[in-house]
Amino acid sequence: MEAPRKDTFDLNAFVRKVWSEGKKHHRDFAWRYIGDAYAVLVSEIMLQQTRVEAVKPYFQRFIQELPDVAALAAAPEERIIKLWEGLGYYSRVRNMQKAAVQVMEEYGGRIPEDFETLLSLKGIGRYTAGAIASIAYGKKVPAVDGNVLRVYARLTENRGDIMKQSVRKSVENDLTEQMSEDRPGDFNQAMMELGAVVCVPNGAAKCEECPLGHFCLARKHGTVEELPVKAPKKARTIEQRTVLVIQDGAGTAIRKRPDTGLLAGLYELPNVEGHLTEKAALARVKAMRLEPLRIEALPDAKHIFSHIEWRMCAYRIAVSSLEEAPQGEFLFVDKRESDKKYAIPSAFRAYTRYMKEENS
């Protein structure tokens, strides 16, 4: 990242201003009142690529069910996946459990304080390690996420591509040099909040509300909307799929996905590539050794992953008996059973509502 124009931007004054006024913009989150390393770990992993409002109920439920690192390490995988159901990016919670096992086996059940040691834990990157070290343990380590990069790029009017690791590292170095030893966790959270609430990523920045407006070079020069510089994302791959809601009088067919790849190890409604006609969908069900009785087209839906977009059509197909299907390929469940035991990802949310509420 290009060096900040320190002749016109006083970083020390900037740090003092964030320290004194940035906390006024803090939102009210449960994890801020807990404050231990485990709560920081869980909240920060949940908040990756997920909106804060969506995370709140998940965090409360997760902490109630698995209140400490020992409970997370010992939990059955299906339990943690079920607790995570709807948040997406399930590798996050699998890696978090692996990190918990590391903590139990290698660090006596206490999440490490040291930044570099935290980086050795499965699934923990520089931002999460910085958040844990600074917020939970008071270590002078920056926690640089997209919000912080955006705030810093605008304050310093810097045109380095924030998607580059070299730029992120440069910002980390600058902030480390300028951070106070006193309560660095508050400093990091103030920076995050300014980016999330005031110096926002979408829509117009709220420059009139910004406590750092006096220091902001982008505001001074009218370049706020040009920053930060970010390389364009690759276009998502579009995939067409047909979802089959296959039911008899007792339940709905679901199956477990492979242990690797997209949505690894989760349960799903049967689906195939491409958009099938009714005739082709019935033929597919017959190939499963099931006897279809009737078919109903369901509304189209789509689901967007980070790199793939599913465009789905669907059919609800009544069959004479699901027990005729090959053993081991499907589970036959009602919706209440699924809600308790089986994690079906939000990609299928448009169609899980057609699952039967109870056995009849």
Image (tube, grey):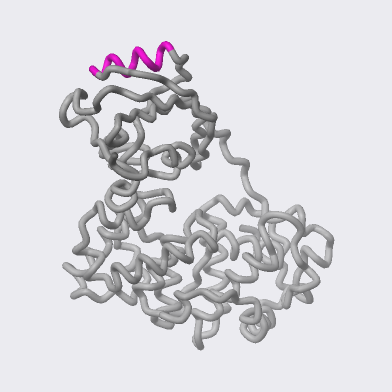
Hey, which quadrant is residue 243 in on the image?
A: top left
Q: Position of residue 233 (x, y in %)?
A: 58, 40
Q: Position of residue 309 (x, y in %)?
A: 52, 34
| Residue 101 drawn above or below residue 230 | below
Q: Nearer the viewer, residue 192 or 359?
A: 359
Horizontal placement of 2 versus 80: left or right? Answer: right
Residue drawn 29% across and 15% down?
A: 286
Residue numbers of the magenta segment: 279-289
Horizontal placement of 184 versus 197: left or right? Answer: left
Q: Nearer the viewer, residue 3 or 194?
A: 194
Q: Position of residue 156 (x, y in %)?
A: 70, 66
Q: Is residue 257 visible?
A: no
Horizontal placement of 85 versus 4: left or right? Answer: left
Residue drawn 45% across and 36% down?
A: 351
Hey, which quadrant is residue 273 in on the image?
A: top left
Q: Is residue 205 visible?
A: yes
Q: Main secondary structure of the magenta part?
A: helix
| Residue 7 drawn above or below residue 345 | below
Q: Position of residue 176 (x, y in %)?
A: 52, 74
Q: Nearer the viewer, residue 120 or 297?
A: 297
Magenta span contains residue 287? yes
Residue drawn 50% across and 38% down?
A: 307
Q: Looking at the image, which residue sits at the far front?
A: 360
| Residue 288 drawn above or below residue 203 | above
Residue drawn 30% across and 62% down?
A: 120
Hey, which quadrant is residue 193 in on the image?
A: bottom right
Magenta span contains residue 50? no
Quadrant, the C terminus: top left
| Residue 6 drawn above or below residue 304 | below
